[in-house]
Image (cartoon, coloured by chain):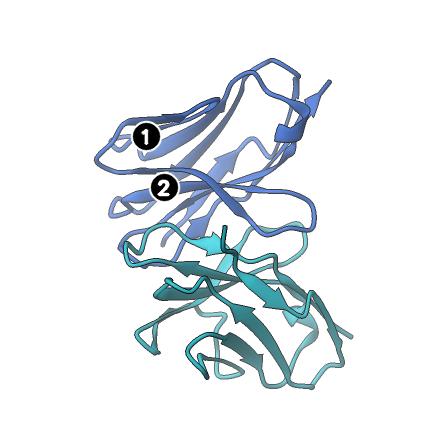
């Protein structure tokens, strides 16, 4: 059964550095999402992406964040200048043409020191 | 604003007992309600979902009920097993491809 994959599984970075989190969605998925989960808290929506453009974004997704689907398979989340409060688990998710069911990857744990 | 409240935050049951987790949502335009199971160190796994035109859905030991008037939905797990132990999240969304708004999660512990 196909799965969403994410790399790296754990990323440690210093405050102010740029990070790129990578996701490979399931091949027939058309909708793509990034969510984050701060330790012990609920999963929070960051951004959704459909038809090669952002369809919705949350207040968290400010101009320090960007998303890209550079080659039709990978889906990336970039944080330009990381802050301590960006430390969290970041999940990529994808949905097929029905658009309802979202399938999550295993996550990337981002630690900003 | 959009919000999903989930209770209880922790739930401990004996193996074989039933477990019920409840969620309420604020936005009456919500029409899709999935439930996710998250095991330690893994991403949320979709286990069951329900759409607003249905009142109940069952899949083996798992069932979900929806009361649109009261804006609440529940997850029922019967004959619980130790491998059901995990954190369960409810969520809601408003439109096809729309964002999921998650509840706070329920840590379910099934004691053998």
From the viewer's perspective, is A84 left or right of B49? right
Left or right: residue B30 versus residue A67 is left
Q: Earlier in the sequence, mark 1 or mark 2?
A: 2
- Say which of B4 and B32 sits in front: B32
Q: Residues within 10 Å of mark 1 (few under 14, many from 20)?
A: many
**Which one is in front, B88 or A87?**
B88
Per the rendering, the colour in which chain B appears is blue
In the picture shown, does residue A70 fall above or below B66?
Answer: below
Q: Chain of mark 1?
A: B
- Badge 1 vs badge 2, beta-carbon distance below 8 Å: yes
Give the residue at x 42% y 29%. Answer: B74
Residue B66's disc number: 1
Point out residue A59 in the picture as x, y percentages from the top left corner: 45, 70
Could you tell me residue B9's position as x and y percent?
60, 35
The chain to which mark 2 is attached is B
Quarter of the image with the C terminus of chain B is top right
The percent position of residue A2, horizontal first and vertical second, equals 49, 55
Vertical position of residue A64 compared to residue B34: above or below:
below
Q: What residue sits 27% from the left and 27% below the top?
A: B55
- Secondary structure of the residue carrying tag 2 is strand
Viewer-side residue, A15 vs B32: B32
Q: Position of residue A83 (x, y in %)?
A: 67, 77
- The local crowd at label 2, few if under 14, some if 14 to 19, many if 20 or more residues have their Cα within 10 Å, is many
Q: How many marks?
A: 2
On screen, residue A20 versus residue B40, left or right, reads left
Q: Colour of chain A?
A: cyan
Question: Which image quarter: residue A48?
Answer: bottom left
- Residue on which the image places disc 2: B33
Tell me what residue is drawn at x 68 percent, y 25 percent: B82
């Amino acid at each position: 059964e196909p799965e969403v994959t994410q790399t790296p599984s754990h990323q440690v970075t210093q405050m102010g550095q740029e990070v790129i989190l990578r996701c490979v969605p399931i091949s027939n998925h058309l909708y793509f999402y990034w969510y984050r989960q701060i330790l012990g808290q609920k999963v929070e929506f960051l951004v959704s992406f459909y038809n090669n453009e952002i369809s919705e974004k949350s207040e968290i997704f400010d101009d320090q964040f960007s998303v890209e689907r550079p080659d039709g398979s990978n889906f990336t989340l970039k944080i330009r200048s990381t802050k301590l409060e960006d430390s969290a688990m970041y999940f990529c998710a994808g949905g097929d043409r029905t658009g309802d069911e979202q399938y999550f990857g295993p996550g990337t744990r981002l630690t900003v020191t | 604003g959009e919000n999903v409240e989930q209770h209880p935050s922790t739930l401990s049951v004996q193996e074989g007992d039933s477990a019920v987790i409840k969620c309420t949502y604020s936005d009456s335009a919500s029409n899709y309600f999935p439930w996710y199971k998250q095991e330690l160190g893994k991403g949320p796994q979709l286990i069951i979902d329900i759409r607003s035109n249905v009142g109940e859905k069952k899949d083996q030991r798992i069932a979900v009920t929806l009361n649109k008037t009261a804006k609440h939905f529940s997850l029922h797990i019967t004959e619980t097993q130790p491998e059901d132990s995990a954190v369960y999240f409810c969520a809601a969304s408003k439109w096809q491809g729309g964002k999921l708004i998650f509840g706070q999660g329920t840590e379910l512990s099934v004691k053998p």
